[in-house]
Amino acid sequence: NPAEEQPETQAWEDVQLPFTDVAEDAYYRNAVAWAYSSEPRVTSGISESLFGPEYDCTRAQAVTFLWNVFGRPEPSASARRFSDVKEDDYFYKPVLWAAEMRITSGTSAENFSPGLVCSNAHILTFIYNALGKPGHSEAQEGGEWWEPAFNWAKSVGLIEGVLSEPFEPEAPCPRRNMVEFLFRYHNMKSDKRL
């Protein structure tokens, strides 16, 4: 289960952030505060003073954020290895874990493509898969590959006020939205809504 170390009454507004590119009134400000203050830390930004909210989230970043949220579980030794993922990469264990848990596979049999930018559809599907496809049924099969994840995310309020309508599945997902989605999930768990 994802880590929930902070009490439900945590005042994220009071967390002092080192990031100069996260405005106090940004819709994702509390999400960044949660991600930065969580134990283990979900993300520490792209530098000591920058979070990079406008930067598109890469595959490596997405699985690392999820791995951290889930408490940094140790992948099994038999996990699939990719030629473009090295042991000294920060995302090495997150990638092995994500592949092992079927959160995402590689972009080919040999490559994970860690630097590839994630679309909205990819991010929602990663989160949906990481949570074990909540509410999934065979009736949801068919249509676009991302529809079950999108329908679930919409039904629980994960994307409300964050993604524009109509949904743009291929649009790149910025880092600010990735942490916002994860923060909303964290709060839903506290509210027992999932």
Image (tube, rainbow, N blue to C red):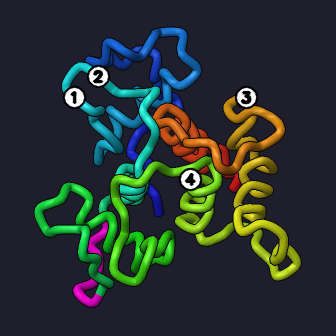
Image side of residue 121 versus residue 63, left or right? right
Marks 2 and 1: in contact by CB < 8 Å?
A: yes
Image side of residue 45 versus residue 155, left or right? left
Dot 1 falls on a residue whose secondary structure is loop
* Sequence-first disc among 4 and 2: 2
Q: Which mark is residue 47?
A: 1
Farthest-out residue, top:
24
> Of 191 and 86, which appears nearest the observer?
86
Q: CA distance from mark 1 to mark 2?
A: 5 Å
Marks 1 and 3: in contact by CB < 8 Å?
A: no
* Sequence-first disc among 3 and 1: 1
Q: Is residue 159 magenta?
A: no
What amino acid is found at the position of numbered circle 4 in the picture? Ile
The residue depicted at 28 percent of the width and 83 percent of the height is 76
The residue depicted at 41 percent of the width and 56 percent of the height is 59
What amino acid is found at the position of numbered circle 1 in the picture? Ser
Q: CA distance from mark 3 to mark 2?
A: 24 Å
Q: Position of residue 113 (x, y in %)?
A: 36, 63
The residue depicted at 77 percent of the width and 62 percent of the height is 147
Marks 4 and 1: in contact by CB < 8 Å?
A: no
- The span shown in magenta is 73-78
* Sequence-first disc among 1 and 4: 1
Dot 4 falls on a residue whose secondary structure is helix
Q: Does residue 128 sit above or below 138 in this rendering?
A: above
What amino acid is found at the position of numbered circle 2 in the picture? Leu
Dot 3 falls on a residue whose secondary structure is loop
Farthest-out residue, right:
139
Tag 4: Cα neighbours inside 10 Å, few (<14), some, or many (≥20)? Answer: many
